[in-house]
Image (cartoon, rainbow, N blue to C red):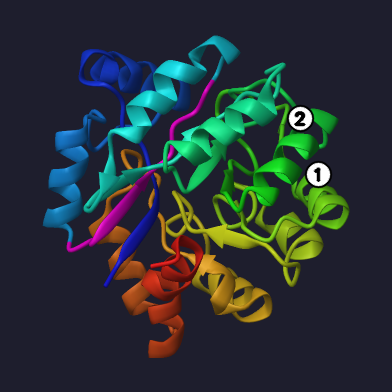
Amino acid sequence: MIIDFHTHMFPDKIAKKTVAYLADVCQMKPHIYGTYEELKQITLESGVDLSIALPIVTKPKQFRSINEFAARYQEKPVISFGSVHPASENYKEELRQIKELGLKGIKLHPDYQETHFDDIRYKRIVSYASELDLIISVHAGMDPKSPNDVHCTPEMAAEMIDEVAPPKMILAHMGGYQRWDDAEKYLVGKPVYFDTGVSLDKMSEQQILRIVRNHGADKILFATDLPWSRPKEFIKIINEIALTEEEREKIFYKNACKLLDF
């Protein structure tokens, strides 16, 4: 069994335009244009059993449309999380609505939400989302949108963990995209999950293994960040590096099933 804990999809009418814009910002070639049908097809073709779609509310006014769209996709092979913006004046009500819609978690992206992760508004959101038993996935590390202003550094994430202690928080991109040395320094060993999204093919095998072993294979989630990485390529990497079969099973699906209550 394989669960991809970090993918993206968009409504059909805006998917191609949105992904083309993001590709231009990131200077990366997408493998799909982000519709549900494309995500479903590549999920099944790749031997992935379930993909988790992670939407981002980039403006508070997007809350209703994005979360109502997400609520339509709550069955295998694709389920979607919701999202909330740190500038929302009604974040508690919005998080309760996400819970009532049956969504299992939220995605926060400090760069696209233009707020640093040590902001008190994020701490309040993470705290209340945790009270509601929601999973919290956070973009961590550098993003091509603002490469010189990292909105969620490993140090900021460590502060959140120390002050708020969220039991179901995931730091995407192995704790901090292109900030893996700092992730090892400030985050490894702390009670937080890392996902492998768009990172495995950019890290050395030695660093991947070191993080897995020192952080704990029970806190690593398989993820691609599709459309930016192909599932088959990341599955191949996990299968070829020097992990034990038990570690692979935890990374591929056991940790995800525990978080999702499957």
**CB under 8 Å between discs 2 and 1:** yes
Secondary structure of the residue carrying tag 2 is: loop
* Residue depicted at x 75% and y 55%: 182
- The disc labelled 2 sits on which kind of residue? His
* Residue depicted at x 23% and y 62%: 49
- The disc labelled 1 sits on which kind of residue? Met
Q: Which residue is mark 2?
A: 116
Residue 206, quarter of the rendered image: bottom right
Q: Residues within 10 Å of mark 2 (few under 14, many from 20)?
A: some
Q: Which residue is mark 1?
A: 156
Taking depth in this image into account, of 163 and 18 the one nearest to the observer is: 163
Q: CA distance from mark 2 to mark 1?
A: 8 Å
Question: Is residue 221 part of the magenta span, yes or no?
Answer: no
Question: Is residue 55 part of the magenta span, yes or no?
Answer: yes
Seen in the picture, residue 132 relative to 261 is either above or below; the reply is above
Q: Residue 89: tell me if it is visible.
A: yes
Please state if 236 lies on the left or on the right of 152 as rendered. left
Which tag, 2 or 1, sits closer to the chain's start? 2
Magenta span: chief secondary structure: loop
Q: Which residues are magenta?
A: 47-57
Secondary structure of the residue carrying tag 1 is: helix
Q: Residues within 10 Å of mark 1 (few under 14, many from 20)?
A: many
Q: Residue 147: tell me if it is visible.
A: no
Identify the mark at residue 239; answer none if there is no mark. none
Seen in the picture, residue 156 relative to 182 is either above or below; the reply is above
